[in-house]
Image: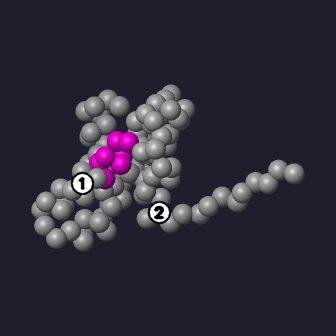
Amino acid sequence: MVRIAAPRITTPRAAARPAVGSAAVPPNSVKAIVVMACDDDVLPLQERIETVADESELDEVHDTERNLFYVACTRARDRLLVSGVQPASEFFADLSAKRV
């Protein structure tokens, strides 16, 4: 008997975080990656930005969020789909500049 797990429903906040431990997955090792909800208020997560105390902490939040986005995108071997609505995340400019 084959048991199929029910799909897990996530909230928008949970969906903003990588669904797979992408740092543990080597670059170019997954055939296709979809990075969704890359909207301006989701990436970087607005809740994290609102809790920072000073400019250096804000820089650290942006660097961490940008790194997570980059790591997720670089795991795709054949296909990468990144989606978002306007206003899109500032990290989209990084993709077009680096041509990931």
Q: Position of residue 17 (x, y in %)?
A: 43, 56
Q: What segment carries the magenta color?
A: 65-71
Which residue is located at x 33 percent, y 55 percent?
43
Position of 42 with respect to 49 (left or right) is right
Q: Nearer the N terminus, badge 2 or badge 1?
A: 2
Query: Where is mark 2, residue-wise?
Result: 14
Judge whether residue 29 can be spotted in this image. yes
| Numbered badge on residue 29 | none
Q: In the depicted view, which residue is nearer to us: 30 or 86? A: 30
Question: What secondary structure is marked by label 1?
Answer: helix
Query: Quick check: 31 above or below 45?
Result: above
Rendered residue at 59%/63% (across/down): 9
Q: Of residues 78 and 67, which is closer to you in this image?
A: 67
User: How many C-alpha atoms fall within 10 Å of the one at disc 1: few (<14), some, or many (≥20)?
Assistant: some
Residue furthest front in the image: 24
Q: Position of residue 97 (x, y in %)?
A: 25, 33
Near mark 2 (Cα within 10 A), the count class, few <14, some 14-19 or many ≥20, is few
Q: Which mark is residue 62?
A: 1
Q: Are marks 2 and 1 in contact (CB under 8 Å)?
A: no
Residue plotted at (13% across, 67% down): 54
Residue 95, image quadrant: top left
Q: Nearer the viewer, residue 87 or 72?
A: 72
| x and y percentages locating residue 86 in the rendered image | 34, 52
Q: Amino acid at mark 2?
A: Ala
Which three-letter amino acid code belongs to the residue tagged 1?
Answer: His
Q: Quadrant of the C terminus?
A: top left
Question: According to the image, what is the colour scheme of the structure?
Answer: one colour
- The Cα–Cα distance between marks 2 and 1, rounded to whole angstroms, is 18 Å
